């Protein structure tokens, strides 16, 4: 169980579930010409999950000092699992993930796609060891990687099968996946800033220089509030200009995404305590899941 908690198994399940939804709820619903068969999507999921798990492990290794202050009861590295064993798991999972990524790139005939897995692995290590300590840059990088875990399905499913005849249609579906990737990016960026404000005490003690430490808790809270409003506006724009003809989708987004985002904005405006920012962080994770679940609507479009 300690190993499962170390790799953040719940988050990994969400990644796998999201990629399956894109494949079978979205792409399969329209009979789109895709590159991956059942084995291919399984390999993609395993490669993504392994590299993500490795990223979670290296993040915990570098976060031991801050976690001892912010969440002492949840520290695993150095207690339940030694740092040496955790690092060995990090190496092993990276090798498996990157190896699977190489094989998958070979299967679809796009060897250059292999570089995506290398870049993700390197960025996760760089984030944990250095970028996380820099104001906002680390938040942006990890949020891009979250969005990429969605976009990578479109890259491997659609791009290898583009022809002059189907190019326009393939790109239309790719843009839909890109919209979901951007949604995941912006929601995760807001959540990362909320978590930094929540963990400011432990981060300060560890000598980190996160956004709230660099500019102050109040200014960081103002940025958090502004970003939450931007998220509301972005989703409203998407509903009005992209899916307005689908009444069920409009109702779903109003209830499951826009309303919770407005609630989060209100809570962010008034948030002061660690507990309040923790609640905001959890709500943002819930909204991201609800947004991803909207992919199921394409099965009934």
Image (cartoon, rainbow, N blue to C red):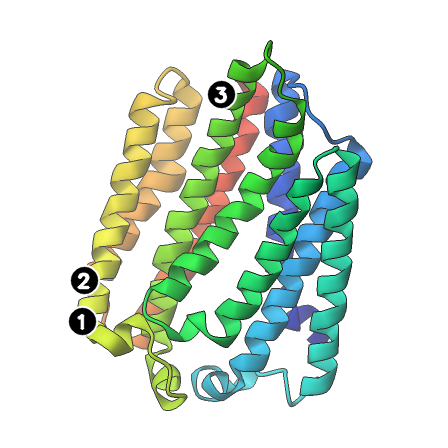
User: Residue 239 location in percent, x, y?
Assistant: 34, 27
Q: Nearer the viewer, mark 2 or mark 3?
A: 3
Task: Calculate the distance from the C-alpha at mark 2 to the C-alpha at mark 3.
Answer: 36 Å
Classify mark 1: helix, strand or loop: helix
**Residue farthest right in this picture:** 39
Discs 1/3, front: 3
* Mark 2 touches mark 1? (CB < 8 Å): yes
Q: Picture coordinates of residue 103 (x, y %)?
A: 79, 45
Contact, CB < 8 Å: mark 1 with mark 3? no
Q: Residue at x 18, y 71 (%)?
A: 218
- Nearer the N terminus, badge 1 or badge 3? 3
Camera-nearest residue between 129 and 179 = 129
**What secondary structure is found at the residue carrying circle 3?**
helix
Task: Using residue 281 as the reference point, say whether residue 112 is left or right of it.
Answer: right
Earlier residue among tags 2 and 3: 3
**Disc 2 element:** helix
Residue 158, relative to residue 127: is it above or below? Answer: above
The label on residue 172 is: 3
The spot of residue 136 in percent (x, y) is: 33, 64
Residue that mark 1 sits on: 218
- Residue at (38, 33) in percent of width and height: 253
> What residue is drawn where x is 22% and y is 60%?
223
Identify the disc placed on residue 254: none
Local crowd size for mark 2, using a 10 Å CA cut-off: few (<14), some (14–19), many (≥20): few
Quarter of the figure that contains the N terminus: bottom right
In terms of image quadrants, where is residue 118? bottom right
Marks 2 and 1 sit apart, C-alpha to C-alpha, by 6 Å
Q: Is residue 139 visible?
A: yes
Circle 2 sits on which residue? 222
Instruction: Kindly report the distance in space between the C-alpha atoms of the residues bearing marks 1 and 3.
Output: 41 Å
Q: What residue is at 68 percent from the left and 24 percent from the top?
A: 34
């Amino acid at each position: 169980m300690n190993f499962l908690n170390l790799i953040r198994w719940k988050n990994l399940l969400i990644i796998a579930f999201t990629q399956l939804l894109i494949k079978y709820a979205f792409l399969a619903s329209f009979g789109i010409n895709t590159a991956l068969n059942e084995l291919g999507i399984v390999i993609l999921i395993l490669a993504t999950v392994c590299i993500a798990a490795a990223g979670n492990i290296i993040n915990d290794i570098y976060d031991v000092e801050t976690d001892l202050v912010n969440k002492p009861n949840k520290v695993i590295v150095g207690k339940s699992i030694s740092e040496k064993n955790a690092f060995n798991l990090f190496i092993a999972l990276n090798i498996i993930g990157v190896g699977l990524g190489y094989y998958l790139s070979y299967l679809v005939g796009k060897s250059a796609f292999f570089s995506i897995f290398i870049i993700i692995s390197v960025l996760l290590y760089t984030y944990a060891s250095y970028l996380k300590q820099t104001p906002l840059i680390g938040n942006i990088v990890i949020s891009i990687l979250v969005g990429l875990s969605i976009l990578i399905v479109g890259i491997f499913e659609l791009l290898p099968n583009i022809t002059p005849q189907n190019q326009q249609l393939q790109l239309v579906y790719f843009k839909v996946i890109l919209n979901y990737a951007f949604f995941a990016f912006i929601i995760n960026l807001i959540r990362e800033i909320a978590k930094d404000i929540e963990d400011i005490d432990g981060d300060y003690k560890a000598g980190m220089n996160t956004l709230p430490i660099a500019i102050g808790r109040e200014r960081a809270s103002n940025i958090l509030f502004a970003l939450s409003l931007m998220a509301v506006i972005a989703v409203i724009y998407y509903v009005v200009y992209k899916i307005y003809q689908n009444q069920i989708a409009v109702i779903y987004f109003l209830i499951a995404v826009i309303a919770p985002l407005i609630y989060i904005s209100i809570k962010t405006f008034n948030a002061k305590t660690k507990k309040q920012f923790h609640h905001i962080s959890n709500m943002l994770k819930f909204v991201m899941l609800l947004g991803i679940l909207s992919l199921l609507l394409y099965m009934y479009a």
